Amino acid sequence: MDLWSLVQIMFRRWWVVVPLLALTAWCTIALTDSIPPEYEVDGAILLVGPGVDDELADEVGTNNRLLQLSGSLGTVAEALGLTLQSQATRAEFDQRGLIPEYVVGVDSRSPIMQFLVAGEDPDAIVATMDALMTEAEAQLTLRQDELDTSTEDRIEIQRISSDNEPTPGFGSRRRAQILLAAVGVVVTLASAIAVDALLYFGRRRRQRRAEEPTGGPDLDDDRSDGAELSLFDETLLAELTDEQTRGDRPTEVTTTVPPEPPRRGDDRDAVRRRLSEPVGGPERTS
């Protein structure tokens, strides 16, 4: 079956296709409206290194710490990202009632860390974002404390965007709508093909019945169609079988042997005995 045949079936069985497509559209809208939206919030932090002394600042030409960002800050950001994405940190967030399915974006050549949190509860999303940034600051402080880093040489964290409002996302609704619409179209096509096939075979059966002869019953046709034999058919079949059996049975041939004429010299009693014996009896003695 090609595409043109499907189009012909859909136009021919429009009274099946149109109601099913309308039902699909109604179900898609009604069910997807009941799906709650998925909110998203993003945030970012910046790692800032320590400043240089006055002599080095004179050589560089500035003492602005933002203009003195070194390449090692990207490595520190990547290390913090691995810590925040570990299973231990996610399990801790889950125990605290926060959302453990967050995303941390880090580039080893950039001191910027990006976060993305999504969920159905806007309050939980905001709390998770704040907890992520707080955890990044705590992990950075812990690493520097373990290295006995002085205050002047410490790396600091600046929150770039931490107070963003959650925005509703309708990605889950769109996916549900696409899925329901695809299922509805498939069911509609299958139903139209099934109805078309049933009507076709029904029409063919009526045509065969109309073309059948109006004479006596045809036993072969009844048996081929799987129909039960009537009482008349069973009696006729028995008679045909009996005639065939009798025709195949060999016919017994009965021969009559004429009596032997009396011989000369035999007395009358012997002749009477021979004549009175049945055909095929014991041999006669002269």
Image: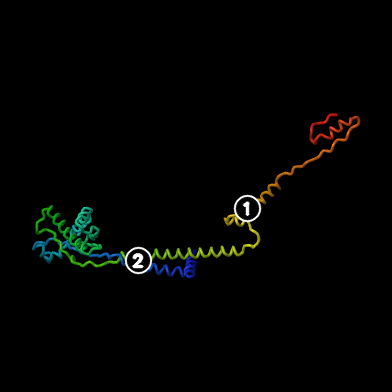
Measuring 21% from the left and 53% from the top, which residue is drawn there? 88
The tag on residue 234 is 1
The tag on residue 171 is none
Residue 90 location (% of width, % of height): 22, 55
Residue 56 location (% of width, % of height): 10, 62
The part of the image, by quadrant, that contains residue 229 is bottom right
What is the secondary structure assignment of the residue under circle 2?
A: helix
The part of the image, by quadrant, that contains residue 283 is top right
Q: Amino acid at mark 1?
A: Glu
Residue 268 location (% of width, % of height): 89, 31
Between residue 88 and residue 237, name the one nearer to us.
Answer: 237
The part of the image, by quadrant, that contains residue 160 is bottom left
Q: Which residue is mark 2?
A: 177
What is the secondary structure assignment of the residue under circle 1?
A: helix
Distance from the alpha carbon under mark 1 to that under mark 2: 63 Å
Give the left or right position of residue 210, taking residue 43 as reference.
right
Residue 211 location (% of width, % of height): 61, 64
